[in-house]
């Protein structure tokens, strides 16, 4: 990659993450590498002259230090989702990141040498009228009124998949299948499969189970009378509210997410899954 430029994003509520960020930035400075820092991180590190808003960060590689939430926020806000991200895991949840803190500098060195693989992950596009957003993990559609169920019908190509009353519906990517969808009794999905996992949450119809659907399908969700309005939450962030006259469309995004992976530090999917299960027991 030569003299690639590096953008850095870090959790700002973690002393460990901020220490790693400072160590990486000192290393980049010593190597003469062009770098910038996401604005909130820069403010905490008192590097105001290097601050760049995340939605304006145009570095060749973006290094994200934190858990899955920090990484999802980065993908949601960077100007180009095709911009590769290297995740360094700090925090309780780090399924999306392979690099452990003790290997951070070695990983940066390998990236600067060009010793990496690019991994492309599908995202879901969610549209309502002219409103558009993308989900790397999942889109959740749930009642905007606490303790109230919503009535929905979900279709693909104008064919009804199911109709019923429930707390909500999760539409997850293969990447997001190990997140909220898994906690809601969704299936484990091998990372080599490209699918949409649809998980009904607490349906009144007890026979309603999760669905695994080709990512090439276009899905639509409509509320049915007399359902209360629903809130769409995408990768943990509220997107918008919808009513019974609106249609939520879910399909494969034309803009996938791009990760940098290093062979020496790559963790097997099922190994990471076992680690999560052990932490939860």
Image (cartoon, grey):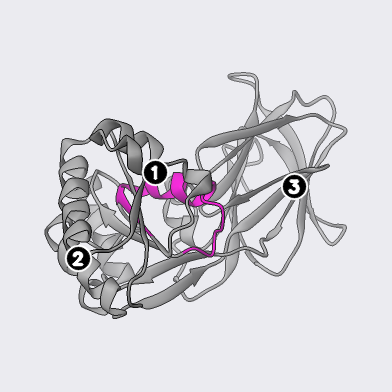
Q: Nearer the N terminus, badge 1 or badge 3? A: 1
| Region rendered in magenta | 62-83
Q: Position of residue 204 (x, y in %)?
A: 65, 35
Q: Residue furthest top?
A: 146
Q: Secondary structure at mark 1?
A: helix
Vertically, is 147 above or below 14? above
Q: x, y percentage for residue 31?
A: 19, 65
Q: Residues within 10 Å of mark 3 (few under 14, many from 20)?
A: some
Q: Is residue 55 above or below residue 263?
A: above
Alpha carbons under labels 1 and 3: distance apart: 22 Å
- At mark 2, the secondary structure is helix
Q: Position of residue 46 (x, y in %)?
A: 25, 33
Residue sitting at x 64%, y 21%: 148
The residue at 50%/71% (across/down) is: 120
Q: CA distance from mark 2 to mark 1?
A: 30 Å
Residue indicated by mark 2:
31
Q: Position of residue 215 (x, y in %)?
A: 65, 67
Q: Confirm or deny contact between disc 2 and disc 1 (CB under 8 A).
A: no
Q: Is residue 113 visible?
A: yes
Residue under pointer 1:
69
Q: Residues within 10 Å of mark 1 (few under 14, many from 20)?
A: some
Q: On the picture, is 130 further left or further right than 204? A: right
Which corner quadrant holds the N terminus?
bottom left
Asked if disc 2 and disc 3 are in contact, CB closer than 8 Å, the reply is: no
In the displayed structure image, the side of residue 186 where residue 10 appears, left or right: left
Q: Which mark is residue 127?
A: 3
Mark 2 Cα-neighbour bin, 10 Å: few <14, some 14–19, many ≥20: few
Viewer-side residue, 253 vs 42: 42
Q: Earlier in the sequence, mark 2 or mark 3?
A: 2
Spatial distance from mark 2 to mark 3, Cα to Cα?
Answer: 44 Å
Any part of residue 281 in sight: no
Tell me the mark number nearer the camera, choosing from 2 and 1: 2
């Amino acid at each position: 990659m030569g003299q690639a430029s590096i953008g850095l994003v870090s959790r700002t509520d973690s002393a460990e993450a901020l220490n790693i960020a400072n160590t990486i930035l000192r290393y980049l400075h010593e190597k003469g590498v062009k770098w910038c820092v996401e604005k909130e991180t820069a403010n905490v590190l008192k590097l105001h002259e290097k601050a760049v808003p995340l939605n304006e960060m145009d570095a060749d590689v973006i290094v994200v230090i934190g858990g899955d939430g920090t990484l999802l926020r980065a993908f949601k806000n960077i100007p180009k989702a095709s911009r590769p991200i290297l995740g360094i895991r700090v925090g309780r949840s780090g399924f999306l990141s392979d690099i452990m803190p003790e290997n951070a500098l070695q990983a940066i060195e390998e990236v600067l040498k060009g010793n990496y693989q690019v991994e492309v992950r599908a995202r879901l596009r969610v549209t309502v009228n002219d409103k558009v957003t993308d989900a790397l993990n999942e889109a959740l559609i749930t009642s905007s009124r606490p303790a109230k169920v919503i009535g929905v019908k979900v279709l693909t190509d104008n064919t009804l998949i199911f109709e019923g009353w429930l707390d909500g519906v999760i539409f997850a990517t293969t990447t997001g299948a190990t997140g909220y969808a898994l906690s809601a009794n969704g299936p484990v999905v091998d990372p080599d499969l490209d699918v949409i996992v649809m998980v009904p949450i607490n349906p009144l119809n007890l026979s309603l189970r999760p669905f695994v659907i080709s990512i090439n399908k276009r899905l639509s969700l409509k509320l049915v009378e007399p359902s209360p309005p629903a809130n769409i939450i995408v990768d943990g962030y509220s997107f918008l509210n919808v009513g019974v006259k609106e249609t939520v469309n879910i399909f494969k995004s034309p803009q996938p997410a791009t990760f940098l992976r290093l062979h020496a530090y790559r963790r097997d999917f099922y190994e990471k899954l076992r680690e999560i299960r052990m932490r939860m027991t």
